[in-house]
Amino acid sequence: MDKNQSLPDSCAYIGRKGAKKVSDIPEELLQLLQQGRLETVNLTEWLAIDHITLLLHVLNELGLQQHSETMLAELENIPAKIMKTIPAIASEWLRLLYQMPEPKRTEIMDVLSTHRSDSVRCWAAYIVGLDQLTLDQKLQRIRFFAADEHFGVREIGWMAVRESVAKEIKESIRILSDWARDDNANIRRFAIEVTRPQGVWAKHIAALKENPEMALPLLEIVKSDPSKYVQDSVGNWLNDAGKSQPEWVLQVCRTWEEESRTKETMRILKRAQRSLTNK
């Protein structure tokens, strides 16, 4: 964009509810979102982002526009699906970052991780997931994104490290059990969501589909969590498990009903058993 060209005023869109259809998003608002000057406020806006357009703006913002041609060439054949595009862009960022000296690499990663655009923070979360780090290192670094106030960043956060978590599921459950005790509901919810046996938009975790009891120590911690956000995740976890191990889920539900008669537990149990026919 020409630096002398007037930019839309982002203040006019603060506090909006968000359109229900992509076609209803004002063109000026979409322009602001794809310049990285605003966060999306709902799934419709989140899915409407043209990440390639956003990438060009961010490269320009960081003074890295000389790398745009190479990055775009690598991204040319990526399917136009958001769950393909985000990891692909993250992979290109990771490649570029490792061409830089350490101080510059850290500086750029910090900018991406704290960018005003939630979509850019999604890239940063996936950079962590794709990096060659130990499980402990990945979980330490993804925690920042697990606590993000934006729903999209939190979802991408667990998706980014799910494969690593699945590969070392016993150790992951041990580490995440501490997360399940955190004061931040987003952190607690992450600990459950990342280990869901089937999950959403993610590969299944075979070990937990076959032996969901492995995660019971983690689930027990949040069986009466005060946050509905966490309750929904726990209920969904058990509902997932019920598709392969229904008797185990029913037994857990019976035990929890006896041990924890709170309204929070009852809400979880209702959600957990919604797909089971034999209650």
Image: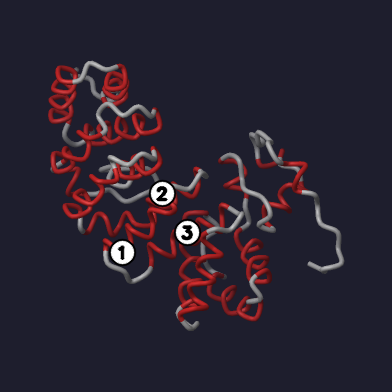
Q: What is the C-alpha distance between the residues marked 1 and 2?
A: 14 Å
Residue 139 screen position, x and y as percent: 32, 57
Observer-side mark, 1 or 3, equals 1
Residue 159 screen position, x and y as percent: 38, 52
The residue pinned by badge 2 equals 146
Circle 1: residue type = Gln
Circle 2: residue type = Ala
Q: In terms of sequence position, does the residue under pointer 2 or pointer 3 come before the other?
A: 3
Q: Residues within 10 Å of mark 2 (few under 14, many from 20)?
A: many
Q: Out of 258 and 89, give the one closest to the viewer.
A: 258
Label disc, if present, on residue 246 of the rendered structure: none
Q: Quadrant of the N terminus?
A: bottom right
Q: Which element type, helix, strand or loop, lies under badge 1?
A: helix
Instruction: Find residue 67 and report its image quarter.
Output: bottom right
Residue at the image position 27 percent from the left and 62 percent from the top: 135
Residue 275 screen position, x and y as percent: 28, 25
The residue pinned by badge 1 equals 137
Q: Is residue 259 above or below residue 242?
A: above
Q: Is residue 194 above or below residue 105?
A: above
Q: What is the C-alpha distance between the residues marked 1 and 3?
A: 24 Å
Q: Out of 182 and 223, give the one closest to the viewer.
A: 182
Q: In terms of sequence position, does the residue under pointer 1 or pointer 2 come before the other?
A: 1
Residue 47 screen position, x and y as percent: 57, 47
Q: Out of 162 and 81, give the one closest to the viewer.
A: 162
Residue at the image position 67 percent from the left and 36 percent from the top: 19
Number of numbered tags placed on the structure image? 3
The residue pinned by badge 3 equals 84
